[in-house]
Image: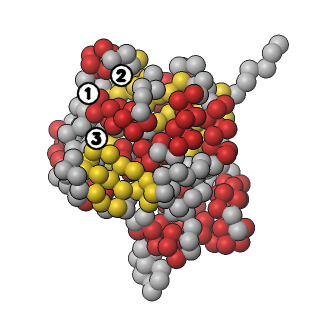
Amino acid sequence: MEEIREKKIVVIGGGTGLSVILRGLKKKNIDLTAIVTVADDGGSSGKLREEFNMLPPGDIRNVLISLANTEPLLEQLLQYRFRYGEGLVGHNLGNLLIAALQEITGDFVLAIKELSRVLAVEGQVLPATLQKVTLSAEYEDGTVITGESNIPQVGKKINRVFISPGDVSPLDEAVIALQQADAILIGPGSLYTSIIPNLLVDNIKKTILSAKGKVIYISNVMTQPGETDNYSVTDHLNAIEKHVGERFIQYVIINEGTISDKVIEQYRLEDSFPVLVNKDLLEQRGYQVIADNFVNYHTYLRHDADKLADLIMKLF
């Protein structure tokens, strides 16, 4: 009997959204790769980026932890942020470990692989590029602001984002993973600061456009203040495909579940609101739309990682 090949899935993004999805996918019998943005310049990551001349480790750390098979205490330890201590305050222990491993191995990717081995990570975690990039945004009024952490603070509608330098090369392993992928998942996550920066790496964009795998967009449930105020699912897709230059997404996964008034009020206080869902318009534009109740609420609203993972497996 012919052996069934493990399906290869690549997930692209950064931040909390990507980590949540990976917690469900890691339980499946798949070959899993996460390609993570390296545009972060705020907080602990920003400080280490400048002081150690390294790529920002924060999003990488979150993804590693989400894919790890570790005791809860170890996860808590890796996410621990120092509140006291000269030179330590604000730093995250997991970020410091990655910085130390880079110093020991002399290589950022090797540092990630070594930490992955220690944490028994399911799959591989790859930076989109090994070159340091700066993310900038141009707003509809022509204003330009530089720095990923500054972009959501301006409070204006974003026209486009771009990286400097603009001709960075992707990690070879990331390109190979995309070429071999049976499915490429984009999102959820911060649209302009976590998702799109990966697609601005030129050969990553070209590889996705020519890839044989299904391309699936998982929509955010709530808007992000300063980035996607008043955005619908269609607005998110328009922004992604505008930056890539053509239509390339086939499937769109949207939440159709009810969000309680209490939760909506909690998010309203942070100027965040449910992403507007226009299912009929999406279908008219040719997307294959999958709608269901995909959210859980425990202190914060999050995607149901297990339900999404089950759905993605059914698409094969």
Counting from the top left corner in percent of width and height, residue 100 is at 63, 72
Q: Is 182 left or right of 132, judged from the image as shown? A: right
**Can residue 219 be seen in the rendering of this structure?**
no
Whole-Å distance between the Cαs marked 1 and 2?
A: 10 Å
Identified at 52% across, 77% down, the residue is 51
Whole-Å distance between the Cαs marked 3 and 2?
A: 15 Å
What amino acid is labelled 3 in the image?
A: Met
Vertical order, 258 against 165 (above or below)? above
Identified at 58% across, 19% down, the residue is 316
Residue found at the far right of this picture:
1
**Can residue 207 be seen in the rendering of this structure?**
yes
How many numbered discs? 3
Counting from the top left corner in percent of width and height, residue 222 is at 28, 41
What amino acid is labelled 2 in the image?
A: Ala
Dot 1: element: loop
Please name the residue that numbered disc 1 is placed on. 277
Please name the residue that numbered disc 2 is placed on. 291
Of the residues under marks 3 and 2, which one precedes in the sequence? 3
Q: Are marks 1 and 3 in contact (CB under 8 Å)?
A: no
Q: Nearer the viewer, residue 167 or 44?
A: 167
Residue found at the far bottom of this picture:
86
Q: Are marks 3 and 2 in contact (CB under 8 Å)?
A: no
Q: Is 220 left or right of 181, judged from the image as shown? A: left
Quadrant location of the N terminus in the rendered image = top right
Q: Mark 3 packing: few (<14 Cα in 10 Å), some, or many (20+)?
A: many
Task: Look at discs 1 and 2 and give the one toward the viewer.
Answer: 1
Counting from the top left corner in percent of width and height, residue 291 is at 35, 22
Vertical order, 209 against 118 (above or below)? above
Please name the residue that numbered disc 3 is placed on. 222
Q: Mark 2 packing: few (<14 Cα in 10 Å), some, or many (20+)?
A: some
Q: Nearer the viewer, residue 106 or 85?
A: 106
Q: Quadrant of residue 219?
A: top left
